[in-house]
Image (spheres, rainbow, N blue to C red):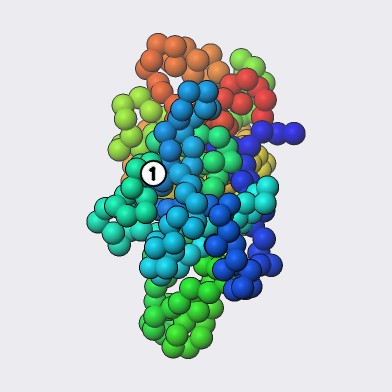
Amino acid sequence: MRSYNALAEPAVDRRSERRGDADWLARRLADPNSRLTAVWRERSLVFDAHAGDQGPAPGMVPAVEARGLVEQAEEVVFLGEAEGVAYFSVDLSDREDPLAGPLRGAGRFVELRQVGAAMSGQGGNLLAYARAMATWHRRHRFCGQCGAATASRQAGHLRVCTGCGAEHFPRTDPAVIMLVHTGAAAEDGSCLLGRQASWPPGMFSALAGFVEPGESLESAVAREVLEETGIAVDSVRYHSSQPWPFPTSIMLGFYATSPGGDVRVDTEELEQAVWATRAELEYALRAREVRLPPPFSIARRLIDNWLRDER
Ligand SMILES: [Zn+2]
């Protein structure tokens, strides 16, 4: 079976049928085995690795020990269950010091992008899920239809407007990321890499962009490539996806083929875009003239697989 992208390996059974069962949820929150994680201002709770660990672990405390946080939280999100253990999350962003009180000494709050690569796939997935839910709640406190306050329901998986009753469900914004290549194997093939002016010197990556309303994924791939580089794409093939809660996306990875052609860069989007053969890219990487995004990213996986001719 194909391996998962970072952050993508499912960590829990979401048990969506239990989200409306208040008695069951209360019992699970009172269960000494249940675990709670927290998000604080875009940062995730992690425990540092101990000897023999694969890497840092998702920060989880017994939910009963953090009862004070649960009682004060505006919303407690039921994430799901794994091996009989229920997992919940809360957002502590309103607190100046999230490690005061029940979480004292529990771990530290870090940017998931900095630790996700070192963490187990399931650990990263659980934190990505919790972070995405926290961001959604913070951004949907008021109804987009009538402006009244909304309230959390369904164990944090729904917000209902207190004015007009509109139901607002968690959102994730689709973004496409695509490695355009000429389709040829080995030394005959080239791929199209771009760089944004804000990136570190020498950094190049696959092209990417947001899917627009009323647009298919394959149309979004072709449009973004044409807009950013002037290159036409003739086929688009889905590869894999990755939750990308930075802040609210899912990355949908594709390979796209193109007959090639001269690049005309849209300098609003990119600073530079170039065709590179496998040999040219490998040489530039060895010479440290070019760097690629971290292995954590789906962009890197698309590029690495193409370099190995495993598309
Ligand atoms: Zn409303």
Q: For residue 284, which quarter of the picture?
A: top left
| Residue lying furthest bottom | 164
On screen, 76 above or below 36?
below
Q: For residue 46, which quarter of the picture?
A: top left
Residue 218: x and y in percent read 62, 50
Q: Can residue 146 be seen here?
A: yes
Q: Nearer the viewer, residue 103 or 125?
A: 103
- Quadrant where the C terminus is found in the figure: top right
Residue at 56% of width from left, 31% of height from top? 301
Residue at 59% of width from left, 73% of height from top? 22
Q: Nearer the viewer, residue 213 or 300?
A: 300
At label 1, the amino acid type is: Ala
Q: Nearer the viewer, residue 216 or 65?
A: 65
Q: Can residue 265 be seen here?
A: no
Residue 296: x and y in percent read 50, 33
For label 1, the SS is loop
Q: Is residue 239 left or right of residue 159?
A: right
Residue at 40% of width from left, 53% of height from top? 39
Is ligand 1 less than 8 Å from the beta carbon at label 1?
no
Query: Which residue matches tag 1?
Result: 106
On screen, 216 above or below 258?
below
Q: Nearer the viewer, residue 258 or 107?
A: 107
- Quadrant where the N terminus is found in the figure: top right
Residue 283: x and y in percent read 47, 12
